[in-house]
Image: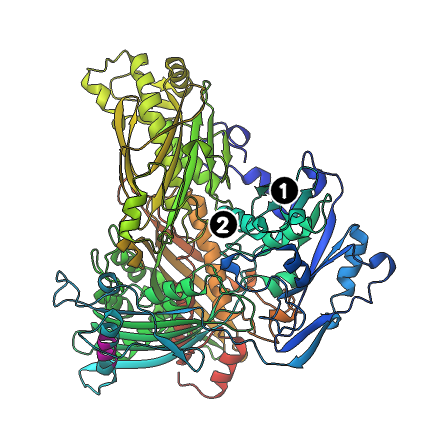
Amino acid sequence: MPGRGSWNPAATPGGGRIDGPAKVAGAKIYASDFRAADLPGWPTTTSHALLIRAADATHVFAGIDLSRLKGALEPSRVVTAADIASAGIRVPAFYEGDLFCPVGKTPLYLGQPVAMLIFEQFDAYDQAHLALRDPSCVKYGAETGPVPIAPYGSHRFVRIAGATPAAPDVYSPLLAGWVVPRSFQDGDSPVWAPADPQGPADAKASFYGEKIRAELAADSPDLLVLDRQFETQSVDPVFLEPEAGLAWYDGTRRMLELVVGVQSPQEATESLAYLLGGAGAEFKPVQIHTHFAYLGGGFGGRDHTTMPLYVALAAMFFPDRPVRLANNRYEQFQSGIKRHAFKMHSRIGIDRTTGRIRAFAADHVLDGGGLANFSLNVADVAATAAIGIYDIPKVDVTTVAIHSRGVTAGSMRGYGTLQTMTAIEVLIDEATQMLRLDPIEFRRRNALPTDGKTITGNPLVGITRTGEILDKLSKHPIWQDRAAVKAAAQRQADILVGTGVACVTKDFGAGADCTLSSVAISREGRITIHSDAVEMGTAIGTALANRVAAIIGGVADEVSVAKVDAYAPLGLVTSGDPYSITQAEQDAASLNPRWVPAISSPSSASVGAHISTHGAFEAARVIFRFGLWPAALELWGIAKSDPRAGQWDSARWQERKLVMPGLAPLDLAAVAAKAHARGAVTGAMVHGFNRWQWSRASFVVAGETWTADIDALAVRAGTRAFLRLDRTKISVPPAVNERIGTAYSSVCGTLVRIEIDRKTGNVRVVTAYTAVECGQALVPEVVVGQTQGGFAMGVGYALLESLPLYEDGPGNGKWNLGRYVIARASDLPMNALEIEVLPPLAPNDTPKGIAEVVMIPVVPAILNAIYDATGHRFQSLPVTQAMIKQALIEGVPQ
């Protein structure tokens, strides 16, 4: 990635995007752009592969008929399940299931590959691709029905708060652990332990959970109880660039090289090594070298994707010739990861006198599609987010992720919280109408305060700013003027007007997040940053550069992302699962100064600003403290004994000059040159691990003890090689933190005003306002851009987008953007969307992740506005024009 020198020599933090010019100029930077001729040392010609996929998952797969591919259209190689088995190729555990459906078995899911065809010449590939669009080349035998597979997982989250906010919980997941069912009945329904207040943790969970449900079921005049069903649909992330990859197996060197675009480089590397690690000699490379290209969008859909596996197989089965495998949009719909369809049954109890929520219970069922992927994780995140921004003392939420023959569902922007928070925000809006309470005041009255406990029993980290967001919403003209605008609209026979509000919180981080970074400064003051973070349109390169610039004075000249193999000096080792390791195992492993709970993690869960930039920030601090600061002291003529020598954290950079009161400003280049001349620290390489708090370790640097939120450190003196410094002390976040559901969180609120055409049912969002808090905004333009994009995705999810789950859905290979409608400019308030970003609480406020939270409140705000306009509550998504028209025809009261 180019840096300061190629985009704006006078750049300062917050001055734009360093990767902008290359992108708008059309430089070849995405995985789908590459061909063999673009890569030094590769052969110049590219061969091409395509996957044939099953469009039926209820009949036995009987084989493929390629008779329509005659003469020049015949593939050079056909790869099937039999070839995979004979080669000794293994499926990584995360992708458990057949890479190719074997003949004689029923496909696990619609869209499962049954064969790969490889063509040496592009023309043959191109014509064959068209000829095979008709799925009749795949033959089927006896009908079996869908393959029965047990649910991917299930949990129950029960919390009973103490008598006062300060009192310990009576029961919570943090105290007792997460609860799983003892069995399943009728295939997919969890069977929970018999209730027993003196029994094991799961029996206690059943006891307290059933007490909560009994309270909600009782006919109490003091309690308003709402019992509602809500359903959400399957959707596609529709990222700009369909998945693609290029690979070459050099049989002479036994070297496999790949170019892919994924959100999880480390995972892809490990999966490829496992895939081929047990294969026969012909299919087992000595070395695998993977190049991770930029992504043309991700939204979670490129996190733990199978695409790199198939790209690698294409090269291994057609050695010595580079092979490209690239989805077109039909194939991306047929195979790409989808958002889970949810079925939710929710019950809420509200004290009629105080307007306080007393209890909440819900049951969630997620359709996970054909492979497990992240279905259980999505189910858990959705469940722990099910109470939204609210402080509810009694909660019981069950969730189960089931297998189906649908296209695999997994990680997608919002990660289950979009579904469950939409359900509760619509439920809250209905409750306020029935209680005749102001919707924003009701939210304020019930909002989780700072230090209040979440559904799992832990407080959020930091100050909760929900009240500030609600204040912004309540004072905005869209909300203040809603009654007057609606009254004016009632005089028009053809238009209905409605205003809706929603406020949500979304976690960022996954509870086992890593950062790997190195920062170096040359004698001339040139700054270089390496990071394992992935650039997928989130401007992570600019965020890294800006966060480092605040510490060492200049925007980077070079930023390299998706680097997972550039940190050998750290000598990292790992063992165990960071999500399930015991405290005893962690304590024992920590005795090894090179051990870390995990080495690298995906760029997902909105970790970019908070997690991914943290490593570069800490590396820059080491360079400044032990390199640039001592050099500056020498230039200023300040002795070590001078009290000012210890005031390094008071120094500030202004336009690449180091400034201290009463001292002459020092140019960055001069300070860097002096640091090199002194043999001081000019480069630092770090690893950090976060389990809802950072690992914290001490190191001896230049004879001094340095303690920071990292667990591994290597430094470079002058231009020498990096040298690992073994830590002298380490504090790894306790294993009990694995039980936390949410610790880091951002809040976002949205107001929308809509107009509905009475005759057609068409909804138009005419104006909107979103307020979000993000801590320190590293790239302010991107915070606004993410919010704009999130708004568009919210409109699409609420009103337009939907995929049938099974035979009529994308798994049949017939879906494209001609029939799948996403939000267009005409669907959005292009010049009437106001975005307000709360300022940080302090200049050193840490950045927060906001990429997901900005989408979520848009959906329930629109649904609440539709109710305000029509008097009808819709309990499923999307709310289409036809649904609204039908409701109006049926005479919904106004």
**In the figure, 497 relative to 76: above or below?**
below
Residue 388 is labelled as none
Which of 543/412 is in front?
412
**In the figure, 442 relative to 722: above or below?**
below
User: Where, quadrant-wise, is the N terminus in this rendering?
Assistant: top right
Task: Tell me the magenta residue range.
Answer: 207-213
Residue 357, position as x, y percentages in the image: 22, 72
Which of 704/768 is in front?
704
Residue 267 is labelled as 2
State which quadrant residue 6 falls in.
Answer: top right
Residue 464, position as x, y percentages in the image: 25, 54
Amino acid at pointer 1: Glu
Q: Residue furthest right?
A: 71
Residue 257 is labelled as 1
Q: How many residues crowd mark 2 within 10 Å: few (<14), some (14–19), many (20+)?
A: some
State which quadrant residue 754 falls in.
Answer: bottom left
Amino acid at pointer 2: Glu
Q: How many marks?
A: 2
